[in-house]
Every structure is written in structure tokens, then in C-alpha cells.
Amino acid sequence: FYDSQHLNTLLMAISRANPDRAGKALSQLLSDKANVRVKNIVEESFSSSSKSTSNVNQFIIDGIRESIDHHTTSSGTRTIAEETFVKNVALACVFVMEQTGEDISNNALEETLGISRHQLSFARETVQQLIIEDSVVSGLQRKRRKDYVKEKVKVYLFSWLRSDDNTRLDTNQCLVDVEHPVTGDKVPVHKRIWRIVNKEAH
């Protein structure tokens, strides 16, 4: 520690506190064959530091990729929370690139992060909008599925079809298994006959 302080004081005095002169002086000093051992020790020190930083960066990238993969490989439609997580992570990854105009290809980002082209495009467009408007992200509103109405009506339709006011049991038919619209379980029900078709409506 004291040696480095003394060396720093001497270097600043010789170079008159000029960083360029100090750097060139050190470079010439380490280039001297007589100082090969000193040079090797310095290189090993910087190499170790660089390797440590590289490991941290790789852990972060791997963590991002694995977390995105964890939230995108499940079967079925992702929840709003899952979709929000993935898109916000993608947004964070491209924020500085869009801010500085760094030209990194979509293919490289997709391969590194494991995100889709759609997610990447959404992230880029969102960042650009945030920068222009000087705003922050807001909650994600998912578009309604095409079968949204059908899914909502299914519960009521199931009860309506089994109502004695609209249909009656067909005693000549056996039970059939149908999917319960609430539980999703298979339940046995009797086939039924429309009262309206058979002119039994009141």
C-alpha cells in the first residue's frame, strides 16, 4: 500500500500530473525487458479483475435468459403477471441500446436473451416512447381473447340448457360426459329435449 502511494507521488511529480504522460511512462517502463516480471504481475492482476467482472456479467445474462424461459415455456396462455414480467425484462435489456442508438441486431438479442421477435419489437417501441415522452412504464393491459364472450357465456348457457323450463330429460337416452364450465371436470348429464321444438312451452 505504502509502495503504491510512493510510486503514485513519484509518477505525478515526473508527469506533472498529466495522465497521458503518466500512462506513457508506465507503458514504456513495463515494455522494458528488465521489467518482464513486473509486467506479468500487472497483467495477471488486471486479467483476474476482468475475469471476475466477466463472470458477473455472464451470471446476469444467464439469469435473465432462464427467468424469461421459466415464464414462457408453460402450456396455455400466460397470465398478465407473467406477460408483464417478460416484457419488462426485455424492455430493461434494450433501454440503453435505444437511448444511445447502439446498433445491435434483433437476431443477436433474440439468441442471447431467449425472447421472441414480437417481445423484442414491443420492448424497443416502448422504450422509444418512454424516452420521447419522458415517462415511465404503466401496467400491461392484455387484449381480450377472441373467445372471451364465449367463455363468459358458457356458465350461464350450461345452467339454462339444464333448466326444466327450457328442456326436459330424454329418458330414452343414456348419460353423456360433458365438461363443467366452472370446474372443467367431466360430469355425466342426461341428454335433454327442447320443450319449444316439441311445443311444450307454456
Image (cartoon, rainbow, N blue to C red):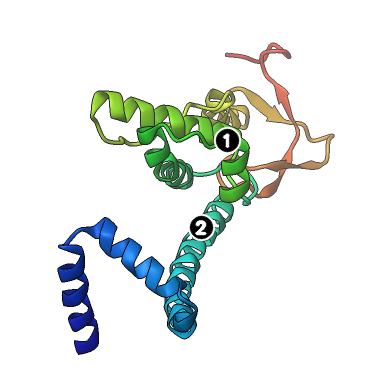
Tag shown at residue 19: none
- x and y percent of residue 100 in the render? 37, 35
Q: Is residue 125 above or below residue 70?
A: above
Callout 1 environment at 10 Å: few (<14), some (14 to 19), or many (20+)?
A: few
The residue at the point 60 percent across, 38 percent down is 116
Apparent side of residue 127 relative to residue 187 in the rendered image (left or right): left
| Image-quadrant location for residue 4 | bottom left
- x and y percent of residue 51 in the render? 49, 71
Mark 2 residue element: helix
The answer to which of marks 1 and 2 sits earlier in the sequence is 2
Mark 1 and mark 2: span between their CA atoms?
Answer: 17 Å
The residue at the point 26 percent across, 35 percent down is 136
| Image-quadrant location for residue 17 | bottom left
- Reading the image, the residue beneath label 2 is 61
- x and y percent of residue 106 in the render? 58, 35
Apparent side of residue 60 relative to residue 70 in the rendered image (left or right): left
- Reading the image, the residue beneath label 1 is 105
As rendered, which of 35 and 180 lies closer to the eye?
A: 35
Nearer the observer, disc 1 or disc 2?
1
The residue at the point 43 percent across, 42 percent down is 84
For the view shown, which residue lies furthest in the bottom direction?
2
Q: For residue 71, say whether it is visible.
A: yes
Mark 1 residue element: loop
Q: Please state, as top left, top right, bottom left or bottom right, where the C terminus lies in the image.
A: top right
